[in-house]
Image (cartoon, rainbow, N blue to C red):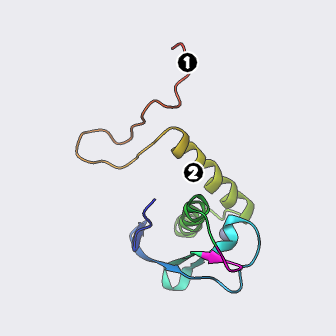
Amino acid sequence: MRIPDVVVIGAAEWDVELVDALPSKEGPECDDFGLTIFSTESIKVARSANGRPVSENCMADTFLHEIIHGVSNTYGLGLTENQVSGLAGGLLALFRSNDLDFSDRGDGMACKGSGKGKKKGK
Ligand SMILES: [Zn+2]
């Protein structure tokens, strides 16, 4: 996926930056490869960790993870780290498995899928 330079969360535009690495984040989980900075409304996503490139799926998971932190903070949800991680992984899998696109591109469909996830025989 293309990670944009800016993402709007609530009424604020958050800067998104792809960085080579985040030195303080060296764990094996996808959510170790990103950072949400609430005071500056910015998100950083690492392209590599421990000298190895981060996979596209992991970067997408990280980006969504950091967005969910921003949504949680903006809307006062108080989500825990585990809740944010679960939502990011779960929603990314849901969107990708069902080819969901929630954007409104002027065709009157606020969300649509390819039907890839439809039950067989229905
Ligand atoms: Zn997190």
From the viewer's perspective, tell me whether residue 104 is left or right of residue 90.
left
Is disc 1 placed on a helix, strand or loop?
Answer: loop
Residue 77 is drawn in which quadrant?
bottom right
Which sits in the foreground, 48 or 111? 48
| In this view, 66 is above or below 89 | below
| In this view, 38 is above or below 11 | below
Amino acid type at mark 1: Lys
Furthest-front residue in this view: 52
Counting from the top left corner in percent of width and height, residue 15 is at 43, 78
Q: Are the residues flagged by discs 2 and 1 in contact, CB closer than 8 Å? A: no
Residue 120 tag number? 1
**Magenta stretch in the rendered image:** 48-52
| In this view, 90 is above or below 65 | above
Q: Identify the residue shown where x is 54% and y is 13%.
A: 121
Is disc 2 placed on a helix, strand or loop?
Answer: helix
Counting from the top left corner in percent of width and height, residue 108 is at 26, 39
Amino acid type at mark 2: Leu
Furthest-top residue in this view: 121
Please tell me how crowded label 2 is: few (under 14), some (14-19), or many (20+) other residues with Cα within 10 Å: some
Q: Spatial distance from mark 2 to mark 1, Cα to Cα?
A: 22 Å
Disc 2 versus disc 1: nearer the observer: 1
Q: Is the CB of mark 1 within 8 Å of ligand 1?
A: no
Residue 92 tag number? 2
Counting from the top left corner in percent of width and height, residue 69 is at 59, 67
From the viewer's perspective, tell me whether residue 77 is left or right of residue 14.
right
Please tell me how crowded label 1 is: few (under 14), some (14-19), or many (20+) other residues with Cα within 10 Å: few
Q: Identify the residue shown where x is 35% and y is 50%.
A: 103
Ligand 1 image-quadrant field: bottom right
- First in sequence: mark 2 or mark 1? 2
Residue 58 is drawn in which quadrant?
bottom right
Q: Identify the residue shown where x is 59% and y is 60%.
A: 61
